[in-house]
Image (tube, helix red, strand yellow):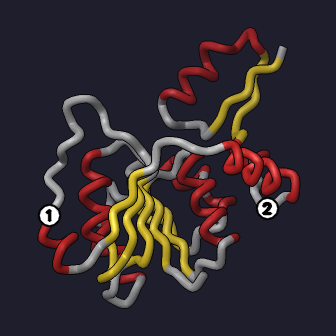
Amino acid sequence: MGDSVAVLGAGPIGCMHAVLARARGAYQVVLVDVDPGRLVLAAPFGADMRVDSSAEDPVAAVRRLTAGRGASVVIAATPSPQAAVQAVEMARRGGRVVQFGGLPQGESRPGIDVNRIHYEGLHLIGVTTFAPRHNRKALELIASGRLPVEKLITHRFPLSQFEEGARLALAGQALEAVFLP
């Protein structure tokens, strides 16, 4: 409630984080992605601002959008080492940084400024597992319509076009592709 939230990664998980941040009362939600096409697909998920990190520095953009303070909550929902570093850099003093996306093998030590964590009093939170109550809550949110999961399905293909659908999904040109018999 009352937080500014930056979500790094505009894939399906990042989009759901944006929706959940708004549902929990965030007054500002910023969605960041390196792929401008993904940001277009993410438009229906209610972010106040979408930042193309291939065209502008996302840390500077989030700081500008938060009057220089940084985001209260930053969620790294992408397996990008660079995003993990940026998440720490764009958090406000006393902010929370959630590392939701695991990093690739061999790239899990991205060079985060630990002094920033210490002197700015940042809270780093890692997320890997969920309890059955989390699944129940997710189902309740979906059933209530507060989580617009139907908007995640950006493409539908007949099974005969599996190769085309898989290519789009793997290229990040679809949030979710569904194959119909």
Which one is in front, 70 or 129?
A: 129
**Label 1 vs 2, first from the N-terminus:** 1
How far across and how far down the image is residue 145, in percent? Answer: 84, 58
The C terminus lies in which quarter of the figure? top right
Which one is in front, 46 or 69?
A: 69
Q: Quadrant of residue 65 in the image?
A: bottom left
Crowd class of label 2 (few under 14; some 14 to 19; many from 20; radius 10 Å): some
How far across and how far down the image is residue 122, in percent? Answer: 29, 73
Q: Is residue 127 left or right of residue 159?
A: left
How far across and how far down the image is residue 116, in percent? Answer: 17, 72
Q: What kind of element bears circle 1?
A: loop
Residue occupying the point 30% across, 54% down: 84
Q: Looking at numbered disc 1 in the image, what kind of residue is underneath it?
A: Asp
Which one is in front, 134 or 80?
A: 134
Instruction: Using the image, tell me which numbered label, if any, was put on residue 84.
Output: none
Q: Are marks 1 and 2 in contact (CB under 8 Å)?
A: no
Residue occupying the point 42% across, 78% down: 72
Outermost bottom residue: 67
Residue 56 showing in the rendered view: no
Question: Mark 1 highlights which residue?
Answer: 113
Distance from disc 1 to disc 2, alpha carbons, whole Å, reads 37 Å
Q: Looking at numbered disc 2 in the image, what kind of residue is underneath it?
A: Arg
Q: Quadrant of residue 177 in the image?
A: top right
The N terminus lies in which quarter of the figure? bottom right
Instruction: Using the image, tell me which numbered label, if any, was put on residue 146.
Output: 2
Residue 178 showing in the rendered view: yes
Number of marks drawn: 2
Residue occupying the point 21% across, 37% down: 107
